[in-house]
Amino acid sequence: MASDVATVAAELTAMVAADHQAARQANSDDPAEQLAWRRLTARHADRLSEIIDAHGWPTADLVGEEAARAAWLIAQHADRQLDVQRRALRLMEQAVADGAASPRDLAFLRDRTLVNEGQKQIYGTQIAGVREGSPIPWPCEDPEHMDERREEVGIPPFSEYVAQFSPA
């Protein structure tokens, strides 16, 4: 089992390296590049689902910190496979409750899933676009208290977060 888990950890890490390399294609003007990105994220989401079937949620205790973070990112990018994203969200909720996953990562995945479902996000982590040089978040539930919720899970205030998207 230990060697199997080590193989899974290496696979998750490799999948995220491929994700990072291909991420620029997500918003490309070239439809072929967009399609390549979609196919990659779909393959990764399918494989994550198989890994979950075999091992449960890949926590840091199981696969190591880097591979656990990779599993989260793969779930985060499973935008066209809401079943996988929802399942990952449920499993991460339990992992956070057990102290085995990051509340911050869970907040990002929760917002991403909500946006993909057409609902309002909670933490303001998902950006819809940029208007006049300023990032605009997808609609957020109770925006007046968003920074309080962000602080509870270790996310910087919204103004600091969006500054990283602004041109320097």
Image: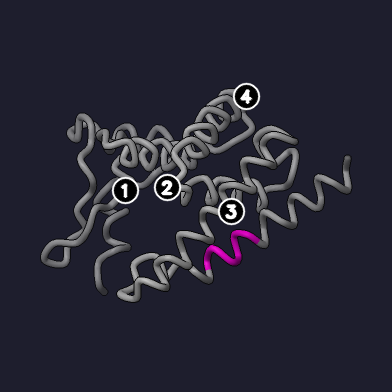
Q: Amino acid at mark 2?
A: Arg
Residue 52 in view: yes
According to the picture, the residue beneath numbered tag 4 turns out to be 98
According to the picture, the residue beneath numbered tag 1 turns out to be 126
The local secondary structure at tag 3 comes to helix
Work out whether mark 3 precedes mark 2 in sequence or the reverse, and give the earlier one: 3
Q: Amino acid at mark 1?
A: Gln
Number of labels in the image equals 4
Residue 135 quadrant = bottom left
Alpha-carbon span between mark 3 and mark 1: 21 Å
User: Which dot, 3 or 1, sits closer to the camera?
Assistant: 3
Q: Residue at x 38, y 42 (%)?
A: 112
According to the picture, the residue beneath numbered tag 2 turns out to be 80
The local secondary structure at tag 4 comes to loop
User: Which dot, 3 or 4, sits closer to the camera?
Assistant: 3
Alpha-carbon span between mark 2 and mark 1: 16 Å
Q: Provide the residue span drawn in magenta.
A: 15-20
The local secondary structure at tag 1 comes to loop
Which label number is shown at residue 137?
none
Alpha-carbon span between mark 3 and mark 2: 12 Å
Work out whether mark 2 precedes mark 4 in sequence or the reverse, and give the earlier one: 2
